[in-house]
Image: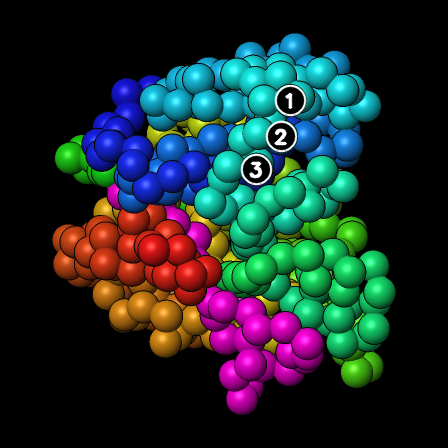
Amino acid sequence: MNLPLNYPPADRGTLVVWGYLGSYPFGGMTWQALHYLAGFRRLGFDVWYVQESERPLLHAETFEPTREPGANATYLARYMEAIGLGDRWVLRPPGATACVGALDREGLERLYAGARLVVNVCGAQELLPHHDAIASLVYVQTDPVSDQVRVAAGDGEKIRELDAYDCLFTYGENLGGADCPVPLERYVWHPTRPPVVVDWWATGEPPEERTLTTIAKWRHTDKDVRWNGSVWRWSKHPEFARFLLTAQRVGVPLEIAVSAISDEELAELRRHGWRTRPSALVKSPAAYRRYIRGSLGEFTAAKEQYVATRSGWFSDRSVCYLAAGRPVVMQDTGFRDGAPVGEGLLLVRDLDEAVAAVDDLVARYGRHAAAARAIAEEHFAAERVLGDLLTSAGVE
């Protein structure tokens, strides 16, 4: 991949990112981590990626759980090199004491001791005793609701974990809103949103196909949340059901690159006019980017947990569509005040709104495409999003 870097001198000190880049080698998770890494580097930090979780890795070729680091270290090295940070990563495999990458164990501990900030994206890294040496530790919660409910329910393990952080951020931009029933106790959660390196997605090419697409894991069976008699499922399938008839009522194809779906559910989608393809076909970072850039735009639902709670969550996949100048029709999660909506980004609550939004996107495509790119630049660009995060964390 030929990615523009545009890095200034790294004169603002050392910043460490924890994430899933070395353990979940999928396109979306890879781009998420790379946007954070390159975004902080563009802000003038000496950025390192570190992973030392005791959780099993998913093998970078077979995608089966493994504790053998070889394929994952190769994957990590490849993508760190692609963003100009090939000498700035460390992987300590599960169960191991020795590190792979640029530093040994003693060097890693010196890195932590000298870092201005360590950012735990997704909470990917569990906290270990030697992390006590870190001067400033930030948690970026990309999946809102669950942590907040666990704290309100008095979950001591979660409270002890969150107490260790100096600053907490969440993609739930509407948490605390009058229409959001998620409890907020004990902590201040600063709103943030998914960053995107906009020029990595830019394309002067028109869409290869006039198809609205998305990439989705259809069904999750874990992470459901219960609160005050309600059950909020961490799954997209109940929300996509609300829009099942959309494909039959609009003038362009709708397609899902999908996984974790039964044959019966797949057949039902197709009976209602949806195109489908296995998400394995867009699993690599290059294929993931090619699929998004080749689409007319995105049509997607969100997980019930984000919709029912009006959490204000936004997708780190959808920001890639926007950056590519591909308009997004997305189920409303309460994000309506987070960026301009109506052109480029269309938030919908029901079937009729979805049909009207798709029809308008097609009728005024050039205007929507330009607006999508402008929204990415003005509201999701990594330099802007991460600059705001640093300010909230007290990092000058």
- Where 222 sits versus 79, above or below? below
- On residue 113, which mark appears? 3
Label 3–label 2 contact, CB within 8 A: yes
Distance (Cα) linking label 1 and label 2: 5 Å
Residue 106: mark:
1
Q: Disc 2 marks which residue? A: 109
Q: Which residues are magenta?
A: 172-198
Q: Position of residue 367 (x, y in %)?
A: 15, 58
For image coordinates 83% across by 67% down, the residue present is 155
**Residue at 24% across, 47% down:** 325
- What's the residue type where badge 2 is placed? Glu
Tell me the CA gap for discs 3 and 2: 6 Å
Tag 3 near tag 1, CB within 8 Å = no
Magenta stretch secondary structure, dominant: loop
Label 3 Cα crowd, 10 Å radius (few <14 / some 14-19 / many 20+):
some
Could you tell me if the residues under marks 1 and 2 are in contact, i.e. CB atoms within 8 Å?
yes
Q: Nearer the viewer, residue 255 or 300?
A: 300
Relative to 334, is 226 on the left or the right?
right
How far apart in space, not on screen, are marks 3 and 1 (Cα)? 11 Å
Asked whether residue 298 appears in the rendered view, the answer is no
